[in-house]
Amino acid sequence: MGEAFELERGRYPTFWVDKFCLRTPGGDPTEALQSLSVSIMSCDRMIVLCGMSFPSRLWCAWELFTIFAFQHRDQAMRRIRLILIGQDKGSGPIEALRTFNVASATCYSPI
């Protein structure tokens, strides 16, 4: 897969994984979060690994909001690859996304 990408674009693909990129030595992700929207919009595609907890996590909601806020819906939908994961496969995660309410979203920091 990487070789085909390189033949087409002249470089190997790169991946930005927010879980790892937002970790900082001091434990405070504030600086990394300030540029999160720029990082997201710089990506060609977004792979969403969606289980039941995905729609309730504020960071995940913010990332999806960023994709949809800065372009037309059809463009955003072409950039997102939704993969249902875990035991919750089926309509559970989809329904949770459909009925998302920011007031119910949570944010957790182990610090």
Image (cartoon, rainbow, N blue to C red):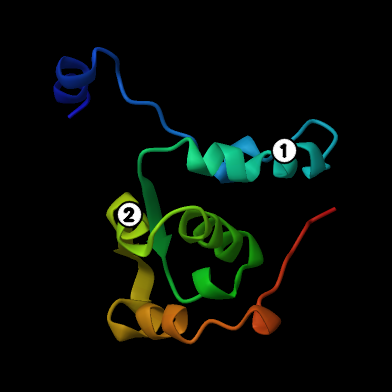
**Disc 1 residue type (three-letter):** Ala
Q: Determine whether, in the image, residue 36 is placed left or right of residue 25.
A: left
* Count of numbered circles on the image: 2
Q: Give yes or no for contact between labels 2 and 1 (Cβ–Cβ under 8 Å).
A: no
Q: Determine whether, in the image, residue 101 is placed left or right of residue 77.
A: right
Closer to us: 83 or 65: 65
Q: In which quarter of the image is residue 78?
A: bottom left
**Disc 2 residue type (three-letter):** Gln
Helix, strand or loop for disc 2:
helix
User: Label 1 belongs to which residue?
Assistant: 32
Foreground mark, 2 or 1?
Answer: 2
Give neighbour class at mark 2: few <14, some 14-19, many 20+ (Cα, 10 Å).
few
Q: In which quarter of the image is residue 43?
A: top left
Q: In terms of sequence position, does the residue under pointer 2 or pointer 1 come before the other?
A: 1
Which residue in the rendered view is the most extreme toward the front? 72
Question: Disc number at residue 75?
Answer: 2
Question: Disc number at residue 7?
Answer: none
Task: Pinpoint residue 11: horizontal percent, then vertical percent.
Answer: 29, 14
Instruction: Estimate the spatial distance between the alpha carbons at disc 2 and disc 1, rounded to whole Å.
Output: 26 Å
Residue 98 vertical placement versus 28 (above, below): below
Q: Residue at x 61, y 36 (%)?
A: 21
Task: Pinpoint residue 67: horizontal percent, then vertical percent.
Answer: 48, 54
Task: Pinpoint residue 106: horizontal percent, then vertical percent.
Answer: 70, 73
Q: Determine whether, in the image, residue 58 is placed left or right of residue 86.
A: right
Helix, strand or loop for disc 1:
helix
Q: Which residue is drawn at 43% across and 70% down?
A: 51
Q: Residue at x 24, y 12 (%)?
A: 10
Residue 71 vertical placement versus 94 (above, below): above
Task: Pinpoint residue 73: horizontal percent, then vertical percent.
Answer: 37, 63
